[in-house]
Amino acid sequence: MSEADWPLFEVFIRSRSGLEHKHVGSVHAADARMAIEHARDVYTRRQEGVSLWVVRSADIVASDPEEADALFEPARDKVYRHPTFYAIPEEVKNL
Amino acid sequence: MYTQALDIHGKDPAASAEAGSQGARFQTRIDQEEKIEPKDWMPEAYRQTLIRQISQHAHSEIVGMLPEGNWISRAPTLKRKAVLIAKVQDEGGHGMYLYSAAETLGMSRAQMLEQLLSGAAKYSSIFNYPTLTWADIGAIGWLVDGAAIMNQIPICRCSYGPYARAMVRICKEESFHQRQGFEIMLTLTQGTHEQRAMAQDALNRWWWPSLMMFGPSDAESKHSAQSMRWKIKRFSNDELRQKFIDITVPQAHFLGLTIPDDELHWDEATQHYRVGSIDWSEFQAVLKGNGPCNRERLEARQRAHDAGRWVREAAAAHAARSRRDTAAQVAGEAA
C-alpha cells in the first residue's frame, strides 16, 4: 500500500534582484519550511535564484481554459489602447 | 538522464482517440504548434501516453542514480568525486522535475512510486547493466548521457507544456554530464596501457546497450506514428539512433578506441556510418526484467524507500504538531 503524498507546493524563483518571481515547478513537502528546502535542492543547484516563494498548490485559484474567450476576448478589439493606433505626422517629434 | 522509446501502451491509443469536434479541435491546436497545458481538454489517450512516457522517464532518472552512485566512494580524485556527486544529484533533480510534470496530468507521486517499486512501471533498459570499473563512469557520461541528449532535445518542443519545460531545464544541465564523461575517457586513453584497456573494455560493454536506448527499430515501433501526430515525438527511433552513431564514431576514433562492431563502416553514398545488427533479444530480455542488474536496482530502491520511512513519518508528525500549535495560538489570541 502506498503512503499518502505530502502536500504539493508550487515553486517560484526570483532569478536576480530586480526581476519578478517566476513559476518553475513543484515539490512535495510536509510543511512550508521543508518546501523551501526542497525547492532549493531541486531548482537552484546552479545559482538560478536569489529568492524563493512556495505556495500550496491547493491554494492556487486558476481561470478555466474553457472561459478563456469570455475573459480575454473583450480586449481583442480595443486596439486604441495601443500607441500605434494613433496616426501622428512624421514631422512631429518626441511623441 | 533520459527516456527510452519503449512504446508500451496499454491499448492502441489511436483506436481510443476521441473522435468528434473536440478531438479535431485538439489536433488543430497541435498542428499549429500550440502548447497543451494541464487544464486544457485533451484526449484520454494523449493523457495516458504522456503519463506513461513521463513517469518512465522520471523512473529512469531515479534508477539511473544507482549505477553511478556505486562509484562515488571510489572516485579516483577529490575533483572526480565532487563532479560525480553533482551529476548524481542532477539525475535526482531531473527525476523530480519529471514527476512534477507527470503529476499535472492527474497521477499522484505515490502512485508512480508504487508502480516503480512493484515493477509495474518500466525504466530505461540501460540502467540494468553493472558499472564494473571507473571507466564505466566515463562511458556512461559520454555514451549514455550522449544518447539521452539526442533523445531529449526534440522533447523540448513536445506539445505538452509542462513536459517541454522540464526538458529544457534538463537539457541545459545534461551537457556537463556528457562532457565530464568524455573527459574521463580522454584521461584514461592518455594514461597507462592498463588504463587504455580499461577504457576500451568499458566502450565494448556500453556501446550496444547505448544504441538500444533509442528503442526498437521503426518497423517494430507501432505507436510512434500517433506520438508523432501528437508532437510528443519529433523523430523516429532509427533516425535518432543514426544521428548518435554518426557523431559518436568520430569521437571514439579521436580517443583511439575501437567500436566493438566488425560490420561498422562509412557509407559514402548516404554519408552515414552503418552498424551491424543490434541484438534485440538482449533488449527484450533486459526489458522483461532479466538484465544483469534488474533485481538489484529495484531492491536498492525498495531499501531506500523503507529506510526513509521513519524520516517521512517524523516530518509529517512535526508538520501536524506545528499546525496544531499555530491553530492553538490563533485561538488563544482570538479569545
Image (cartoon, coloured by chain):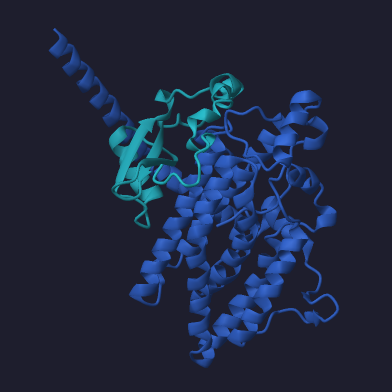
Q: Is residue B36 visible?
A: yes
**Percent x, y for residue A38?**
36, 44
Chain drawn blue, letter?
A: B
In terms of depth relative to the viewer, which is nearer, B115 or A34?
A34
Query: Viewed as shown, does residue B142 lie left or right of B210?
Result: left
In terms of depth relative to the viewer, which is nearer, B227 or B159?
B159
Residue lying farthest to the front in this orientation: A91
Q: Is residue B12 visible?
A: no
Does B257 appear above or below B134? below
Give me the residue at 59% from left, 67% from top: B146
Does B208 appear above or below B188? above
Give me the residue at 71% from left, 41% from top: B32
Give me the residue at 23% from left, 17% from top: B327
Does B330 appear above or below B72? above
**Percent x, y for residue B79?**
36, 74
Give me the residue at 71% from left, 74% from top: B246
State the quadrant of the C terminus of chain A: top left
In terms of depth relative to the viewer, which is nearer, B29 or B61?
B29
Q: Colour of chain A?
A: cyan
Does B168 appear above or below B104? below
**Percent x, y for residue B60?**
57, 52
